């Protein structure tokens, strides 16, 4: 049975998904054990699922076959995600040949791919054993190599070229560190090898640790022996699978459903948490009464009214545009013109003054300083509506297709779904960037569910384009 450790703000929902699908949860927090009714298990994990520094992202890392199964299951269940997987395993070990050298920088042919090594003292044609220090995951990431490679075990990672002892941040206490250090020193003295104790080692039996260290030391010896053989570039040892999901507002709604099976959960629980509103969510779920179905519509209305009040007092609202490449672009912020709560949705109108000349995307109209973009944001709609005016005259609208926006006290965030619909004063309407959307889908970054969602949204706009144009001068749609 595959063992998984789960951490982060999505841990209850993700743990529920994994448990229901036959995975074994280990090193479980007290809160999750209580909610899911599982025992505390100190078995080392095959896979770790956790947040990254980006609160929208979930990282899956671990032994390749097991971690890939976990990643694919979560993508299947959450559906509406951007996903990136490295085809090169982190900490995998290769026999490489230097094919290009510039100063202390070398480019190595690894057989299936090329990677950068720095510093590099070897000459062109030299054969080197290297490990993957940084695996490329998102578009534009580089493959970075190191001669100080690692061999990953369940309890420890043996390090070649770095003869030191280090510990997971989750290992605390001088006594346990002294015990582990003594085991390492006895086995590694004189080898030139180092060791990193993984968090699972604090629960391991001494004999288990010794056996794993001996096994990894022997594997390291055999890897280094390959330099004596006339082998072509190739992978010598597996590392860790690594995959990242970027959770859209729609994926977070799916997470809400799973969490609601375990504990009272208001609508938009995970969106609000990831937008930095944990205290507000905790208060709402603890103090305010849920409705019969557990979603808390009345509670949600109260949260939206609170956000609306705060937004009215915000001088500027930041706009975050998350791309399928993994980039987050900060658009020019806007001044709040109007905020209202209507039928459990939050609608915001922002005023953005154009500061520099150029051309409006899709409209092919000159952009001039002093033009005004009235940006309409509706938390229930999968679009952002840009309405451009000059001297009181409407010069066109640009409707960005995206996942329903997430809104906090001073920020609007959405995942861009590439398609845009351009609406001209002449009445002409067209969809642009369809090929780019197709490319991201075929590359496996955008899921089928998101791809079809984007296409359906564009078609709805084409059927009723007038519903997506806003006239601020009359305070109603043109």
Image (spheres, grey):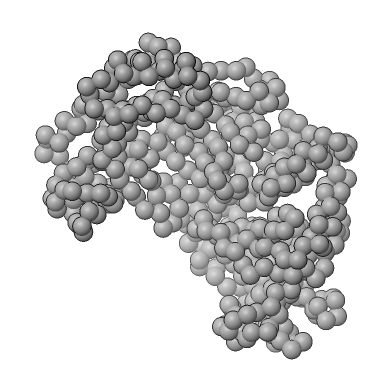
Residue at the image position 72 percent from the left and 66 percent from the top: 316
Quadrant of image for the C terminus? bottom right
Total residue callouts: 0
Image point (29%, 36%), residue name: 149
Kindly give the residue lying farthest to the front in the view shown. 174
Q: Is residue 443 left or right of residue 192?
A: right
Residue 376 can be seen, yes or no: no
Q: Which residue is drawn at 36% across and 35% down?
A: 239
Spot occupied by residue 186 in the image (x, y as percentages of width and height): 30, 15
Asked if one can make out residue 289 in the rendered structure from this viewpoint, the answer is yes
Q: Say left or right for 216 vs 340.
A: left
Residue occupying image coordinates x 32% and y 33%: 150
Please name whichever residue, 68 or 333, is drawn nearer the observer in this view of the structure: 333
Image location of residue 389, percent across then percent down = 72, 83
Across and down, in percent, residue 194 comes to 31, 28
Image-based side of 161 in relation to 392, left or right: left
Residues 397 and 179: in front is 179
Q: Going by the image, does 344 lie left or right of 37?
A: right
Q: Position of residue 335 (x, y in %)?
A: 74, 70
């Amino acid at each position: 049975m595959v063992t998984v450790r789960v951490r982060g703000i999505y841990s209850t929902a993700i743990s529920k998904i994994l448990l229901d699908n036959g995975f074994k949860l280990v090193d479980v927090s007290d809160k999750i054990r209580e909610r899911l009714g599982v025992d505390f298990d100190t078995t080392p994990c095959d896979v770790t699922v956790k947040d990254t520094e980006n609160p929208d992202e979930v990282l899956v890392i671990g032994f390749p076959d097991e971690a890939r199964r976990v990643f694919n299951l979560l993508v299947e269940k959450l559906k509406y995600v951007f996903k990136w997987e490295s085809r090169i395993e982190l900490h995998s070990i290769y026999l490489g040949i230097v094919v290009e050298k510039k100063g202390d920088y070398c480019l190595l042919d690894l057989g299936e791919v090329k990677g950068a090594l720095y510093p590099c003292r070897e000459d062109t044609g030299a054969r080197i054993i290297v490990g993957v220090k940084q695996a490329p995951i998102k578009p534009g990431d580089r493959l970075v190599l190191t001669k100080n490679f690692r061999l990953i075990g369940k309890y420890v990672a043996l390090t070649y070229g770095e003869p030191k002892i280090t510990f997971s941040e989750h290992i605390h206490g001088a006594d346990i560190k002294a015990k582990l250090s003594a085991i390492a020193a006895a086995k590694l003295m004189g080898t030139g090898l180092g060791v990193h104790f993984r968090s699972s080692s604090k629960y391991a039996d001494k004999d288990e640790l010794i056996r794993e260290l001996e096994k990894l030391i022997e594997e390291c010896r055999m890897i280094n022996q390959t330099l004596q053989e006339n082998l072509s570039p190739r992978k010598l040892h597996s590392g860790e699978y690594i995959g990242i999901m970027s959770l859209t507002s729609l994926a977070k709604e799916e997470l809400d459903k799973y969490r609601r099976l375990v504990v009272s959960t208001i609508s938009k629980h995970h969106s609000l948490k990831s937008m930095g509103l944990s205290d507000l969510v905790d208060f709402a779920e603890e103090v305010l009464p849920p409705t019969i179905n557990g979603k808390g519509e009345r509670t949600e209305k109260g949260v939206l009214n609170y956000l609306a009040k705060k937004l009215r007092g915000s001088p500027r609202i930041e706009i975050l545009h998350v791309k399928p490449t993994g980039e987050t672009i900060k658009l020019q912020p806007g001044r709040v013109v109007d905020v209202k709560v209507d039928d459990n949705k939050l609608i915001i109108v922002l005023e953005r003054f154009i500061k520099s000349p150029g051309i409006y995307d899709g409209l092919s109209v000159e952009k001039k300083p002093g033009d005004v973009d009235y940006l309409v944001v509706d938390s229930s709609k999968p679009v952002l509506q840009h309405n451009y005016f000059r001297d009181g005259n409407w010069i066109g609208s640009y409707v960005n297709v995206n996942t329903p926006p997430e809104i906090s006290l001073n920020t609007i965030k959405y995942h861009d779904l590439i398609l845009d619909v351009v609406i001209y004063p002449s009445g002409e309407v067209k969809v642009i960037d369809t090929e780019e959307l197709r490319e991201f889908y075929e590359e496996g970054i955008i899921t089928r569910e998101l791809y079809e969602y984007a296409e359906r949204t564009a078609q709805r706009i084409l059927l009723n384009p007038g519903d997506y144009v806003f006239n601020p001068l009359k305070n109603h749609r043109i």
